[in-house]
Image (tube, rainbow, N blue to C red):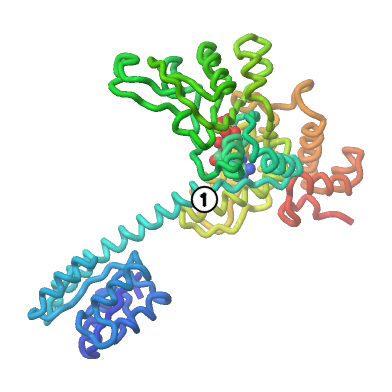
Amino acid sequence: MAESKGKVLIVDDESNARGALTEILREEGYETESAADGFKALGKLGTFAPDLILTDLKMPGLDGIGLLDEVRTASPTSVVVVMTAFATIDSAVDAIKKGAENYLTKPLDPSSLLAVVERAMEKARLRAETALLRARLQERNAFGHIVGEHSAMQELLRTVEQVAPSRSSVLVVGESGTGKELIASALHRHSTRAAGPFVRLHCASLAEGLLESELFGHERGAFTGAVGRREGRFKQADGGTLLLDEVSEIPASTQVKLLRVLQEREFERVGGNETVHVDVRIIAASNVDLRERVRRGTFREDLFYRLNVITLEVPPLRARRSDIGPLAHFFLRRYASENGKRLEGFTDQVMGEMLSYLWPGNVRELEHAVERAVVLAKGPMIGLEHLASNIRGGHKALEPIGSAGLKVQIPGMSITDLERVAILETLKSVGGSTSKAAKILGISPRKIQYKLHEYGAPAGTVNYASDED
Ligand SMILES: Nc1ncnc2c1ncn2[C@@H]1O[C@H](COP(=O)(O)OP(=O)(O)OP(=O)(O)O)[C@@H](O)[C@H]1O
Ligand SMILES: [Mg+2]
């Protein structure tokens, strides 16, 4: 049988009518089911999930209008077309008002029937697409689930829960793409202000004057183009949390004003002298070392101490390799469902490559790599060919990568990273034999096993351990 053009549920109390409709629609390539009244039709919604419900209006039990009402909540994406005798056209108009897509008059004329069905199907497809998009959006906006099995992340998450309820300012530091924004939003959601707004301002992207008016708002006529009073982010965040992202980039004059808000919880709009009071919790995020900026004199020390009441440090991904596997699977599920693909996992080789790569762009880079792979994948597994070439071939991780310039660098790398590179590279060179690698490295095969486990290779996904004896 050719692919179905869509599913139609035929509802009519006359069995002849059901039979005739079924025949015409099946002939045309639609999948059909039929029911003798509204209640029986409702019973079929769950299992059949029709794109289109073609229903008679006058039926014993639940009639067409009653069915229409129920369908709106039971199967909101199904499109309804009603059928009525010419004499009762008023009730068809009624049905349209209640949400029916169209109506057909009996006796039915097959060609107009098919035209109406085709258009209704188009509408059903649109509805389904919209519903899917909305669901995806909700999923994306849903409280960002934080993957973090590594002990450093576990500790960080515990601290988040501990400090969330207080009103103290928090400084979240970490390399780009490590998840600072996610941590900031977790702080907000675990706080007593969770019901209030969470407002984010990216401080680096605005010119000095604009940044001030963005933070504090402005009065009418404060500058050319200020046609009315406008409230700033501080006011928007009243009762909630304000995230100042890339806080290091705030110019000196604005730093002074920010300091005052932190101390006194009040400010004036740009171009005005009315004092505005707010209750806002500040979270600042930075991917540069603020202390260093203080030493260089570009960041005020007093402001630094005000912001830095509590510091949360998000470790780079390479320092928590055991999170690579869980994160990769998390993103695989997310993007597979977004792209409507059924994907089971990564091949051993892919997992091996991902574990030995240094991820200079951290979690964001991993997320993009998995998204790309999901889009490219045709079968159930992500294979090497779906991995970007800079990630493929672990040796490349030892060469300079982008601006981060990561390579085997002495000084410049921690013993832990050097050890990891040594173990994974040696294993690769001996085709994955732990005993051979152990001899070369002068450590026990057990230690290699243990290390691989620490790097996050879930049991059985990396066949490095195949020759243990
Ligand atoms: N632990 C995690 N679990 C799940 N997703 C994560 C995790 N960490 C980061 N992500 C995802 O990675 C991406 C980058 O994270 P985020 O924007 O929070 O990084 P950032 O540290 O603010 O980066 P930047 O300094 O560049 O602004 C986001 O899509 C985020 O949802
Ligand atoms: Mg960020």
Q: Position of residue 410 (x, y in %)?
A: 78, 22
Q: Is residue 410 above or below residue 167?
A: above
Q: Quadrant of residue 303?
A: top right
Question: Can the viewer see residue 54 in this picture?
Answer: yes
Residue 291: give x, y in percent of width and height: 68, 18
- Residue depicted at 15% across the width and 73% down the height: 92
Q: Residue at x 47, y 53 (%)?
A: 338
Question: Left or right of 24: which side holds 373?
Answer: right
Image position, residue 429 (x, y; %): 77, 40
Quarter of the image for residue 32 reads bottom left
| In the image, the residue with mark 1 has its CB under 8 Å from the nearest atom of ligand 1 | no
| Residue 34, above or below 447 | below
Name the residue carrying label 1.
Answer: 335
- Of 110 and 380, which appears nearest the observer? 110
Q: Residue at x 55, y 57 (%)?
A: 343
Q: Looking at the image, which residue sits at the far bottom?
A: 15
Q: Secondary structure at mark 1?
A: helix
Please state if 363 lies on the left or on the right of 151 as rendered: left
Q: Quadrant of ligand 1?
A: top right
Residue 214 % position (x, y):
43, 24
Q: Quadrant of the C terminus?
A: bottom right
**Residue 274 located left or right of residue 437:** left
Q: Residue at x 74, y 40 (%)?
A: 152
What quarter of the picture does the N terminus occupy?
bottom left
Relative to the observer, which residue lies in front, 112 or 374? Answer: 112
Give, as a three-letter code, the residue at label 1.
Answer: Tyr
Residue 353 appears anywhere in the view: no
Q: Outermost residue toward the left?
A: 87
